[in-house]
Image (tube, rainbow, N blue to C red):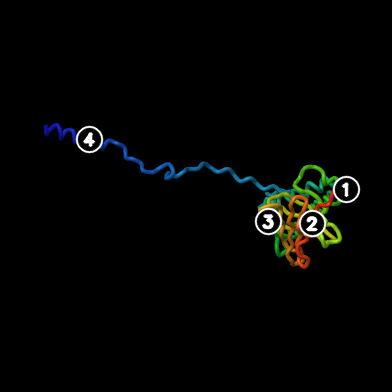
Amino acid sequence: MRQILIATVMALVLAGCDQPEFDNATVEDKPVVNGPSAPARAIEASFDCGRAKGQAQELICGDSGLAAMDREVARLAGLAVEPAAAADWAMKRDECWKADELRQCVMAAAMLEIHRLRKGSKAARGGDGLSVGPVAFLCKGLAKPVLATFVNSDPGAVALDWAGQAVAIDQVTTASGARYDGRWNGQPISFWNKGNEATLTIAGKGDLSCVEQAAD
């Protein structure tokens, strides 16, 4: 009887030695081996980014928002049949390397050119693109309406034009509506648009309530 018991114990020991070692790692613990990642989509501007020259062009080719504005200038210039406009814009854009704030200069140059083209040419206001406007807002405290041209890039921007004054400011994140903040003549300026109403904040004038003027 004792011999049978010993034989049984030995069989169990040998059987245990033949079992594969248990892997305590869970699925979450195991390293995940990823395949090759998809290449990032190249940013497209109105020019060949593979041949970008100068700080302004290099900045645009690394900034999808600025690249979208750059393409929109070229699109509107074509609709307005102003071939020289694209060349003039390119010169202003490339001269921004001299500015203290390169991105602000490039953005403002593009936005003000987009505004000029849309304001001056009915043809430029047609077709599908990123820009909208100019939209006229009547603001309390201002004798003349404020014209606003929007570009729905990421981030977006707006060009504001009133009484011979013009400024372009960037869109910022907000819980509701579309808010744009920047500086004008060294002072902060803000434009908060909600539907057909807006609030324009200018240094020295405070918050001005604005309402969209009905189109003619």
CA separation in Å, label 3 and label 1: 31 Å
Mark 2, residue position:
210
Residue 174: % across, % down = 67, 54
Q: Which mark is residue 172?
A: 3
Which numbered disc flags the more N-terminal residue, 3 or 1? 3
Closer to the eye: label 2 or 4: 2
Q: Which residue is mark 4?
A: 12
**First in sequence: mark 3 vs mark 2:** 3
Per the image, the residue denoted by label 1 is: 216
Q: Secondary structure at mark 3?
A: strand
Q: Are marks 1 and 4 in contact (CB under 8 Å)?
A: no
Assess disc 2: are there few (<14), some (14-19) or many (≥20) residues with their C-alpha within 10 Å of its C-alpha. Answer: many
Residue type, mark 4 in image: Leu
> What residue is shown at x 19% (from left), y 36% (from top)?
9
Residue at disc 2, secondary structure: strand
Q: CA distance from mark 3 to mark 4?
A: 72 Å
